[in-house]
Image: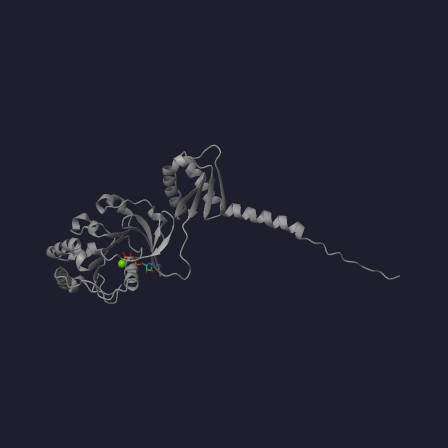
Amino acid sequence: MKEVIIYVQQNKTFFYLPVVLLLALLLNHIRTYKLRNTVRKTLKDNNILNEDTSIYSMTNSSVFVLNAKHSKKERYQEALQIITEIMKEKYYLKRIFNIAIIKKFPGLKKNQKGIFLQSTENGKIEKYKLPKNSNGLAILAKSGSGKSILANSLILQLNITDYLFVSPKGNEDNELGKYPNEAESEILEIIEKANRGEYKNKNTKYIFLDETITLSEIFSKETIRKIATSFSICRSQNLKWILMSQKINKNSGIDFSLINQKIINTPDAKNFEDSLGVKITTPLNSLKLGEFLFYDEEEKILINKI
Ligand SMILES: Nc1ncnc2c1ncn2[C@@H]1O[C@H](COP(=O)(O)OP(=O)(O)OP(=O)(O)O)[C@@H](O)[C@H]1O
Ligand SMILES: [Mg+2]
């Protein structure tokens, strides 16, 4: 008699599926734990947690707060700042009926390069342009935050061809860079020409002053006075200033508040909010290398992706 062995292939899908699902849920729970907990704790500490509020997150970039009270909108904005500070990532708030969604700002696409502005209200991203009627940009940011790199990115993005780049480091950061003593008389000449209207229309001239406060200690008082005066009159003459500095020294004779657009990433900037005419709301520690706070009328994030 022949022996027949029959193998029965058991379909294990039904056994594994719930296990895989459970594992995925558990992993997601762990992954989103920090954000969820930070949101819960911050809302609780700020007294904006209702009895029936529940907090969910499907990904570690957004959290849903169910039964969030509309009346506490202002307090939500304050909580958002704390969450941003703890998570070291920037978040914004979306409201749908009684649901508050706290969402991480979208980043740039992998292949996107250049200088962009991101709205702190809704995370929208636009390419940076320097308005025609602006007298320039003051980049006030700490050492190593990417000021000089940003200046070079500006030259590329704004297609700047006619410029003078002055730095205590000469041509270390820009190939056309000049030392202050080489450039002082040229600056005065440019200001004179701007006053005569020689840079009108498509002929815009740019002066970059890297480490402006250091330069102001080297230039003569008369030169500083002429530079400072030019901030208020050059708008119509198409001379634009790009000032970079780690320090905001009010006694230097350089008043950065007169420059239309400002970029800030310097820890002591809060002390100068009034004199600079800005209101800093996004925590500076949530900024990564090459990111700055930007002020024109409202606060935005400036991203320089190289
Ligand atoms: N947008 C960026 N993306 C990536 N890395 C950057 C970016 N900007 C700057 N870096 C890095 O940070 C370093 C410092 O940048 P940079 O020299 O522009 O800083 P800085 O603010 O001018 O510093 P300092 O005040 O010392 O002159 C660069 O050498 C570069 O490696
Ligand atoms: Mg520099």
Percent of width and height locating residue 25: 56, 47
Residue that sits furthest to the top in the current view: 51
Residue that sits furthest to the left in the current view: 222
- Number of on-image labels: 0
The color scheme shown is one colour
Residue located at (36% from left, 49% from top): 286
Residue situated in front as seen by the camera: 120 or 79: 120
Quarter of image, ligand 2: bottom left
Q: Is residue 37 left or right of residue 278?
A: right
Q: Quadrant of the N terminus?
A: bottom right
Q: Is residue 252 left or right of residue 273?
A: left
Q: Is residue 66 left or right of residue 121?
A: right
Residue located at (59% from left, 49% from top): 21
Q: Quadrant of the C terminus?
A: bottom left
Residue situated in front as seen by the camera: 28 or 162: 162
Percent of width and height locating residue 87: 41, 46
When asked about the image quadrant of residue 125, the answer is bottom left
When asked about the image quadrant of residue 199, the answer is bottom left
When asked about the image quadrant of residue 43, the answer is top left
Residue situated in front as seen by the camera: 35 or 108: 108
Percent of width and height locating residue 157: 30, 62
Percent of width and height locating residue 40: 45, 39
